[in-house]
Image (tube, rainbow, N blue to C red):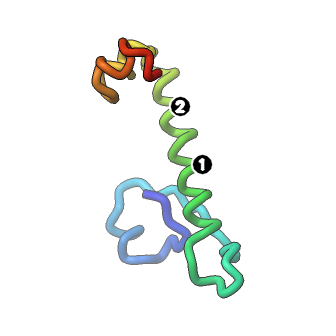
Amino acid sequence: MLNGNKNSSLARASSVVLYVPVKREACPLNLAPTTSSTVSLVIGDAIAIALMKMRGFSEENFRALSIPAVFWEGGFF
């Protein structure tokens, strides 16, 4: 799990914690999860790409798991 607080109850209950501290959100009130949500997306994308490369995940694998074939074959993509 991604967490900015190593001592939170969720972090303590998790077997794997990626500590990603965010000092301040981009929101002027420091309330809306702006910076922290972007950090989470970036780390999630990096993990996904690394796993795709490690496992040899192909375009065919992606097509089979994501979008119905009719979109691919009909020229939508």
Q: Secondary structure at mark 2?
A: helix
Q: Which mark is residue 42?
A: 1
- Amino acid type at circle 1 is Val
- Can you give x and y, in whole percent of width and height, for residue 26 in the image? 70, 73
Task: Tell me how far mark 2 sits from mark 1, CA to CA.
Answer: 11 Å
Would residue 35 appear left or right of 4 to someone viewing this image? right
Compare marks 2 and 1 and give the one earlier in the sequence: 1
**Is 23 located above or below residue 31 in the figure?**
above
Q: Which mark is residue 49?
A: 2
Picture residue at 65% right of the left edge, 70% below the top? 22
Picture residue at 39% right of the left edge, 22% below the top? 62
For label 1, the crowd category at 10 Å Cα-Cα, with few meaning under 14, some 14 to 19 and many 20 or more, is few
**Is 55 located above or below residue 32 in the figure?**
above
- Can you give x and y, in whole percent of width and height, for residue 45 in the image? 54, 41
Q: Secondary structure at mark 1?
A: helix
- Can you give x and y, in whole percent of width and height, for residue 74 in the image? 37, 15
